[in-house]
Image (cartoon, rainbow, N blue to C red):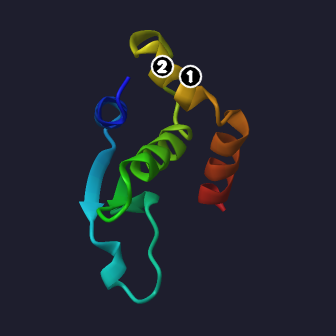
Amino acid sequence: MKESAIFQNLKEIAEKLNLKVCSANLRKYSYGIKSGLCRVEGEYRIIIDKHLQLSEKVDVLIEALQKFDIDTGSIDPDIKRLIEKRGELEREDFFKSENN
């Protein structure tokens, strides 16, 4: 599967989870904002630096999606393998730190 198709599939999964995926020029901020999952006005978003390579954008989406329960029965098996690689611990650690 082409990387562009993987990226598109991951974006669609995020949208099904009601996660808005935004592309932004993060280089313009002098205080070092990085791509990833964040909360804006109580809603989760995935912000991706528009200057990243496509493979890096895919990594950002995978890392963000890993933190949520995803119905893997309805997604492409290749995408499922990519998402499942990261494991349950990252998701648990993320939400523990969110509540503190």
Q: Residue furthest front?
A: 2
Describe the element under mark 2 as helix, strand or loop. Answer: helix
Residue 47 in view of the camera = yes
- Residue 83: % across, % down: 54, 30
Q: Residue furthest top?
A: 73
Residue 81's disc number: 1
Q: Quadrant of the C terminus?
A: bottom right
Q: Amino acid at mark 2?
A: Asp
Looking at the image, is 95 positioned above or below residue 49? above
- Give the camera-side residue of 39 and 81: 81
- Give the camera-side residue of 91 and 9: 9
- Residue 86: % across, % down: 65, 37
Q: Residues within 10 Å of mark 2 (few under 14, many from 20)?
A: few
Residue at screen point 46% across, 69% down:
34
Residue at screen point 48% across, 39% down:
65
Residue 78's disc number: 2
